[in-house]
Image (tube, coloured by chain):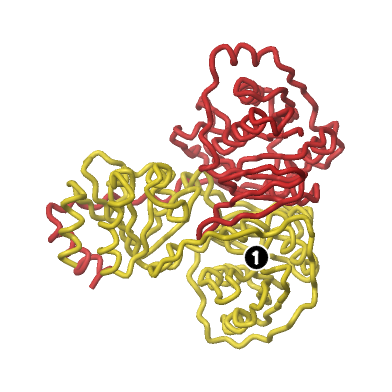
Chain colours: A red, B yellow
């Protein structure tokens, strides 16, 4: 079966984010970019399914400018078979991303689509679920275990109170949580090999989807700073402060 | 203009977070209805009817909704959507799971995790793990919104809303529930606790979390953990506080052996009072702590427990 893995190019998770002085957005000039960590887990899971003989082909897809080919090449170096870039320089809302991915799902007919549960830039946590609704597929979000059995997939999900396991008919959508797997590093020979793997470029405009923005960002500001407090010398002093100054214990 | 609020519950009781989501609905202003979707959930409906500011409680009581599978709930909410301008759910795992499906079926984009309401179409939400705060205007005709409960104060529960039974049954038939493995604890839930004590990698192993239990018992606190402690297998994932775990804002948050990665701070920095206990005086957690204690947690914790 084919597995489709949509990935997003985002700011590297180690980079300290700074808001632009004019409050228009965060400053992304000259910062290190990477595959969104949850998307990397999705790529790893797809490759493991291929190594286990469950998946026959792993296709990575990303939407954005030519720059996102860098992340697609990384996915190819990790083990994806081919890649698709949907070229656009628009900033797209999640619903429009999901509609473009729906077109790719219709073309490629994957049995499983694995996505990261959220991107660490917009923190939206919605594209996977939206794609599931648009393609009328069931979904296993926030997955920590994925097991394909015949024409079904069992997904164990991280939920508020613990874990929940659901069975989904294939084709299905899975979104990854942190503990699904630990992604591998790409080896140098595989990075070289990835350069020769196929990477198709399609123009977002050619899909005939209305990509008009659905949201307008009015401003982006830094969060309220928390002032550092005091260092107490003893536990007695700590207990005294919590009782009499902060009044949070009695 | 009407607002539909999805009730967060376990078929037995209404989760307190729903009261905060209703507060967000009040800030939008409109006629507020609550939807209780579940199975044998009449007692939840009774509770929801007491939520202040709510005029109507819609109850969809059917086996198809027992486990609140996203495929089924999203169809139900989409069927009801024509009567509402705004649809709100709490940004907990149930709401996060099904609400984007509703948005897609209505051809709108979702406004996720709001912490403030500027007007009926403009909302405030954290991005980049809370390192930036965006004010976003929705241009869609209908607003599908998830609400981060730490951003709002709970409404009171002395109301008396009308309860209306729905006979909609929407079963997508493509998914089914297998099992739950829920953590059983006598302590308060992380989302509802007024005091939280969390352990990090500095705890060294799962057994050492017992050192937190005595203090938690004395303070009536919930116990949390950093991602490092969860990934190291010390404790289960549902204890994780942070960007991708639970977002909490208790009156008192005690961070023990937690260095304070931005992903952890994103989950707790709105707490009223933060205490940090760490042997590394350079740990970033001290930059957000009201009270810091530099020292070995294995000495500090027993002493703290004995002095409370």
Q: Is residue B126 left or right of residue A110?
A: left
Q: Residue at x 69, y 70 (%)?
A: B4
Judged left or right of residue B83, residue B223 is left
Q: In which quadrant of the rendered image does the C terminus of chain B lie?
A: bottom left
Q: Residue at x 51, y 31 (%)?
A: A12
**Which residue is located at x 72 percent, y 49 percent?**
A130
Q: Quadrant of residue A84?
A: top right
Q: Quadrant of the N terminus of chain B?
A: bottom right
* Residue B144 found in image quarter: bottom right
Q: Is residue B110 left or right of residue A21?
A: right
SS category of the residue bearing label 1: loop
Q: Position of residue A68 (x, y in %)?
A: 65, 26
Instruction: Inspect this view and state whether residue A218 appears.
Output: no
What residue do we see at 18% from left, 60% from top? Answer: B304
Which chain's residue wears label 1? B
Looking at the image, is B122 positioned above or below residue A152?
below
Q: Position of residue A39 (x, y in %)?
A: 60, 36
Residue B210 position within the rendered picture, expressed as x and y whole percent measured from the top left: 28, 57
Residue that mark 1 sits on? B67
């Amino acid at each position: 079966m084919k597995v489709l893995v949509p990935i997003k190019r985002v700011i590297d998770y180690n980079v300290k984010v700074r808001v632009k002085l004019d409050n228009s957005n965060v400053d992304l000039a000259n910062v290190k970019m990477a595959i969104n960590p949850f998307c990397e887990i999705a790529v790893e899971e797809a490759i493991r399914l291929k190594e286990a003989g469950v998946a026959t082909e792993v296709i990575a897809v990303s939407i954005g400018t030519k720059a996102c080919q860098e992340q697609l090449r990384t996915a190819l170096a990790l083990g994806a078979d081919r890649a698709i870039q949907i070229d656009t320089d628009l900033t797209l809302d999640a619903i429009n991303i999901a509609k473009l991915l729906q077109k790719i799902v219709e073309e490629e007919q994957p049995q499983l689509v694995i996505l990261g549960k959220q991107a660490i830039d917009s923190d939206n946590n919605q594209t996977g679920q939206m794609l599931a609704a648009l393609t009328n597929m069931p979904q296993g979000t926030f997955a920590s275990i994925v097991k394909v059995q015949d024409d079904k997939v069992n997904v164990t999900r991280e939920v508020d109170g613990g874990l929940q396991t659901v069975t989904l008919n294939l084709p299905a959508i899975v979104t990854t949580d942190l503990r699904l797997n630990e992604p591998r590093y790409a080896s140098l020979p595989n990075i070289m090999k990835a350069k020769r793997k196929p990477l198709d470029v399609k123009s977002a405009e050619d899909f005939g989807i209305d990509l008009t923005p659905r949201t307008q960002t009015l401003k982006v500001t830094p969060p309220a700073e928390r002032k550092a407090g005091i260092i107490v010398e003893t536990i007695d002093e700590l207990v005294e402060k919590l009782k009499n100054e902060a009044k949070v214990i009695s | 203009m009407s607002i539909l609020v999805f009730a967060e519950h376990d078929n037995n009781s209404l989760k307190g977070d729903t009261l905060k989501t209703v507060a967000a609905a009040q800030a939008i202003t409109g006629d507020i209805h609550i939807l209780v979707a579940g199975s044998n959930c009449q007692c939840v409906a009774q509770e929801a009817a007491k939520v202040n500011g709510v005029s109507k409680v819609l109850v969809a009581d059917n086996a198809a909704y027992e486990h609140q599978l996203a495929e089924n709930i999203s169809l139900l909410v989409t069927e009801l959507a024509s009567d509402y301008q705004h649809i709100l759910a709490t940004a907990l795992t149930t709401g996060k799971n099904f609400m984007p499906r509703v948005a897609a079926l209505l051809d709108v984009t979702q406004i996720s995790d709001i912490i403030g309401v500027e007007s009926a179409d403009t909302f405030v939400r954290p991005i980049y793990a809370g390192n930036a705060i965006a004010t976003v205007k929705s241009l869609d005709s209908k607003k599908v919104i998830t609400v981060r409960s730490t951003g709002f104060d709970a409404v009171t529960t002395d109301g008396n809303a009308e309860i209306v039974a729905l006979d909609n049954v929407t079963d997508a038939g493509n998914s089914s529930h297998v099992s739950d493995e829920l953590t059983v604890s006598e302590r308060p839930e992380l989302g509802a606790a007024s005091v939280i004590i969390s352990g990090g990698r500095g705890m060294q192993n799962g057994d050492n979390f017992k050192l937190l239990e005595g203090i938690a018992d004395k303070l009536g606190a919930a116990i949390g953990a950093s991602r490092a402690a969860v990934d190291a297998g010390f404790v289960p994932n549902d204890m994780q506080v942070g960007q991708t775990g639970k977002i909490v804002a208790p009156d008192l948050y005690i961070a023990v052996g937690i260095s304070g990665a931005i992903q952890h701070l994103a989950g707790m920095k709105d707490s009223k009072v933060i205490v940090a206990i760490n042997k590394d005086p350079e740990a970033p957690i001290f930059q957000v702590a009201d009270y810091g204690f530099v020292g070995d947690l294995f000495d500090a914790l027993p002493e703290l427990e004995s002095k409370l």
